[in-house]
Image (cartoon, coloured by chain):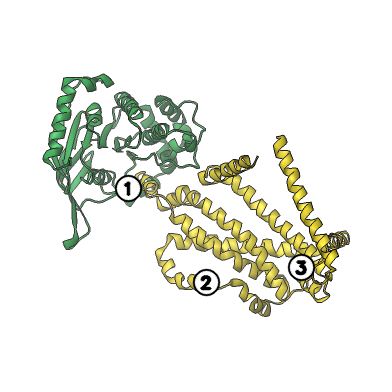
Chain colours: A yellow, B green
Amino acid sequence: MTAKLANFGLRILLIAAVLAVWEAFVRVLDIPAFILPRPTSVFMALYRGTVSTMYFEHLQVTLTETLIGFGVGCSLALVLGTVVALSRRTEYFLYPFIVMFQAMPKVALAPIIIVWFGLGLTSKVITAALVAFFPLLVNTIVGLRSADEDRVNLMRSLAASRWQIFWMLQLPNAMPYIFAGLEIAMIFSLLGAIVAELVGAESGLGMLIQSMNFTMDVAGQFSVLLILSALGLALNGIVTAIRRRVLFWDVSQKLQIEGAKVKKGGTT
Amino acid sequence: MARRAGETRAGDVGNALQDSAVRVAAPTAVRAAIAVRHLAKDYGAGGNAIAALRDIDFSVGEGEFLSIVGPSGCGKSTLLKILAGLMPASSGEAKLNGTPIEGPRRDIGMVFQSPVLFPWRSVLDNALLPVDVQRLGREQLLERAHALIALVGLSGFEHRYPWELSGGMQQRVALVRALIHDPALLLMDEPFGALDALTRESMNVELQRIWLDRRKTVVFVTHSTSEAVFLADRVMVMSARPGTIADMLKIELPRPRSLDVMTTEAFGTYVRRIRAGLNAGGGLE
């Protein structure tokens, strides 16, 4: 316990040391603020933006776009993934489209989507949904098809219907794959929303970064980046927490947790 | 097969409940008898077809325990899958209680080499899987589930999950699951093959005890000659590729048999005869 505490202290010290070196480096070499701002001015910018609630307004916009995009993209991916996994025929016809879209960097579509759907919420939601869609689609298909042959035979030997095999075996069996897809989709939908905002928007954290860039407010951009990584961590944390609850039975997840424990134990 | 399943499902739930209630009340009511005639199975078609089974003729009486021994690749698992209705025969027929086996049936319980438990279901929920699939009504069969779990010595583990159990314990859960819907026929495909020798012997003793208690018709596939003799009323010896019946012998050892029976002269004689049958079939390298 004391060792753990000492380690935590060391970690904080290390971060403080890095920031101190950064600060000294910029001051001594007299680097202009529009190239690399000092950590203190980044924190000042963060403080000002937070106190004036300006950051919150933009955060709310970006968060809304991300979450709606995530919801739409994931719902479509789950439905379409299920259809493709259960029907070889559908797969045959959809396969060329899936392959084509999968190879394409989806964010490259953002400019076109802005032209089609305007500067508002819709274009951001569509970009976020598009980027979130594919990783989950692929994982859903693979997951639903990964049911062990013996387990399928067991269900069949009990005279289970196709639906029962789906609900009682294939779907729960696919959950680890689906959650891995959801985790990627969560981060990707934030990415999609930000990219779409960079291309053209009226509000949002991406738009904020863009406008700060025009005024050469680099410290401000750094402070927004801090908010974005905190947002990414929080969103990922929510999905991970849900996964832990739902997939309590997943042995590979247990191994990960135990592995992390062993690693932590190893450092003390 | 779909017809059969559809029929029962089409009947209202009340019927199913009543049906299961009757079965619970009188577990000794229906007994299966298997009749297999001129059965053959090929994999593939035309010139590339590989003969897996040839001229399989045998029958199993009600409440009888039949062991099938044979070398790897003799088609014994294939035969079991045909009996389970998971796979059609190429020619010939297999009947259960006088009706041809044309697809999966609700009155068969199956145990595989691996326990095949669902990790997201607790021990109790795994045991109740057939009840959920066949909509027999959990309330009616909960008591029976607890009784069977106690019978295999897993009381207190009902709410544990498969990964918390040893291999032997998992296989016991699989056994409970195969018995829960009171099937007329129990098909076991090398169920203890993955266990260590000591666990395997104790599972054999336990299976015999359960069989004496419930008197199911059992078809038990194994690699082990001593396991086959220890458990069975009759042992069917198969030869390799294509699988044919090399020998059929009746085991006349008094029951209940203890593990000591394995050291007796009579037991040795049976084992030697089975080995001779396997050798004649080209089974032992």
User: Which of these two is toward me, A10 or A200?
Assistant: A10
Is A97 situated above or below A185?
below
Question: Looking at the picture, which amino acid does disc 3 mark?
Answer: Gly
Write down the residue under mark 2.
Answer: A103
A189 versus A163 height, above or below: below
The residue closer to the viewer here, A129 or B101, is: A129
Q: In which quarter of the image is the C terminus of chain A?
A: top right
Look at the numbered discs 1 and 2 and tell me whether their residues touch, using CB distance below 8 Å: no
Q: Which amino acid does label 2 sit on?
A: Ala
Residue in view at x 50 percent, y 36 percent = B161
Q: Can residue B256 be seen in this view?
A: no
From the viewer's perspective, is A204 left or right of A142? Answer: right
Figure disc tally: 3
Q: Are discs 2 and 3 located on one and the same chain?
A: yes
Q: Which chain carries label 2?
A: A
Q: Where is residue A128 in the image (x, y as percent from the top left)?
A: 64, 67
Q: Do labels 1 and 3 share a chain?
A: no
Question: Viewer-nearest of labels 2 and 3?
Answer: 2
- Chain on which label 1 sits: B
Q: Is residue A106 above or below residue B28?
A: below
**Residue A33 appearing in the image:** yes
**Residue assigned mark 1:** B4
Relative to A43, B147 lies left or right: left
The residues tagged by marks 1 and 3 sit, at their Cα atoms, a distance apart of 60 Å
Q: Is mark 1 on a helix, strand or loop?
A: helix
| Mark 1 on the same chain as mark 2 | no
* Residue at x 70%, y 65% (from the top left corner): A65
Q: Which residue is at a point 42% across and 62% down the rendered structure image?
A: A87
Q: What element carries label 2?
A: helix
Q: Which of marks 2 and 3 is nearer the N terminus?
A: 2
Residue at image mark 3: A204
